[in-house]
């Protein structure tokens, strides 16, 4: 008897480059999951067009048609649950989610964020890293909690900041690493090797004392 691949929903607000990376990894046999829904808070989001081209069901809800944020979030997450999704990936979803809506997804919901968390939660991460004079920048995948970009960090990709980097150049150089980091992390989660025990991410039953690091050949334990 063949087990079914884990069912995954994705939320995105923009062009969907991280979603494209997930779909590409699946097509190349690197990510054995089934995408059951791609949702957005913007009907014009490029991510929805990518999903439609891949024959994945889509959902677009307008937050302005709801009385408040909680009402929007509860309806959105009810629909995600109805899709049969077992995992939820935030891939450039630019909204803060109410804790009451995301609580049932604790340990099954991840987000990719363009900084080396806990540094630079929120927006304008590349600019803030440059203004701080950092020598290193990167991206993080973390479990989602009610705290903005504050859930346990699972894995990171690191990038040396070069002399002459500006905000756009840094973002451009980081993006290919994001596109490797997110599929690699989701693949480990989907395999069951990587889990959250309620306190910390665990790999093969052992707590991770530091985020996994993206290397040339995929994710590895930090040294």
Image: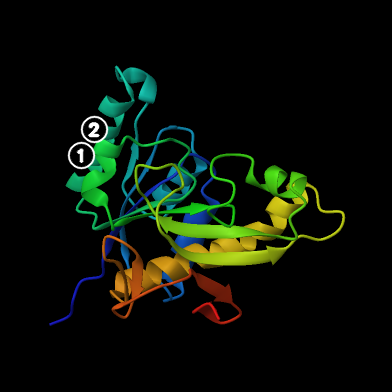
Tell me where residue 213 appears, x and y as whole percent.
54, 72
Q: Which residue is mark 1?
A: 78
Between 198 and 54, the one lying in front of the other is: 198
On screen, residue 168 above or below 197: above
Give above or below for 91 relative to 136: above
Q: Is residue 96 visible?
A: yes
Q: Say whether residue 96 is left or right of residue 132.
A: left
Viewport quadrant of the C terminus: bottom right
The local secondary structure at tag 2 comes to helix
Find the distance from the CA under tag 2 to the CA under tag 1: 5 Å
Q: Residues within 10 Å of mark 1 (few under 14, many from 20)?
A: few
Q: Nearer the viewer, residue 22 or 96?
A: 96
Where is residue 91? Give x, y as percent: 46, 50
Q: Which residue is mark 2?
A: 75
- Judge the density around disc 2: few (<14), some (14-19), many (≥20) Cα neighbours within 10 Å: some
Q: Nearer the viewer, residue 33 or 142?
A: 142
Q: Quadrant of the N terminus?
A: bottom left
Judge from the rendering whether residue 164 lies leftward or rightward of residue 64; answer left or right. Answer: right
Identify the residue at horizontal 51%, vertical 61% (top origin): 21
Query: Which residue, as the protein is rendered here, is positioned at the far right?
Result: 164
Q: Are marks 2 and 1 in contact (CB under 8 Å)?
A: yes
Point 34% across, 30% down: residue: 61
Q: Residue at x 49, y 46 (%)?
A: 92
Tell me which corner region of the image, top left, top right, bottom left or bottom right, holds residue 156.
bottom right
Q: Element under label 1?
A: helix
- Whether 179 is drawn above or below 216: the answer is above
Residue 54 vertical position relative to residue 46 in the rendered view, above or below: below
* Disc marking residue 89: none
């Amino acid at each position: 008897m063949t087990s079914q691949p884990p069912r995954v929903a994705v939320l995105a607000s923009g062009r969907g480059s991280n979603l494209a990376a997930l779909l590409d990894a699946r097509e190349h046999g690197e990510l054995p999951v089934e995408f059951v829904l791609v949702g957005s808070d913007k009907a014009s989001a490029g991510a929805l067009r990518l999903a439609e081209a891949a024959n994945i069901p889509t959902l677009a809800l307008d937050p302005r048609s709801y009385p408040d944020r909680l009402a929007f979030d509860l309806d959105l997450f009810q629909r995600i649950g109805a899709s049969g999704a077992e995992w939820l990936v935030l891939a450039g979803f630019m909204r803060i989610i109410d804790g009451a809506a995301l609580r049932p997804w604790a340990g099954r919901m991840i987000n990719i964020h363009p900084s080396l968390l806990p540094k630079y939660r929120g927006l304008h991460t590349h600019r803030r890293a440059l203004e701080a004079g950092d020598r290193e920048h990167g991206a993080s995948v973390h479990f989602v909690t009610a705290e903005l970009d504050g859930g346990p960090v699972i894995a990171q990709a690191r990038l040396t900041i070069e002399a002459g980097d500006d905000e756009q150049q840094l973002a451009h150089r980081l993006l290919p690493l994001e596109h490797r980091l997110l599929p690699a992390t989701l693949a480990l989660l989907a395999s069951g090797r990587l889990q959250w025990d309620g306190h910390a991410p665990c790999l093969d039953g052992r707590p991770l004392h530091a985020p996994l690091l993206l290397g040339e050949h995929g994710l590895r334990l930090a040294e």
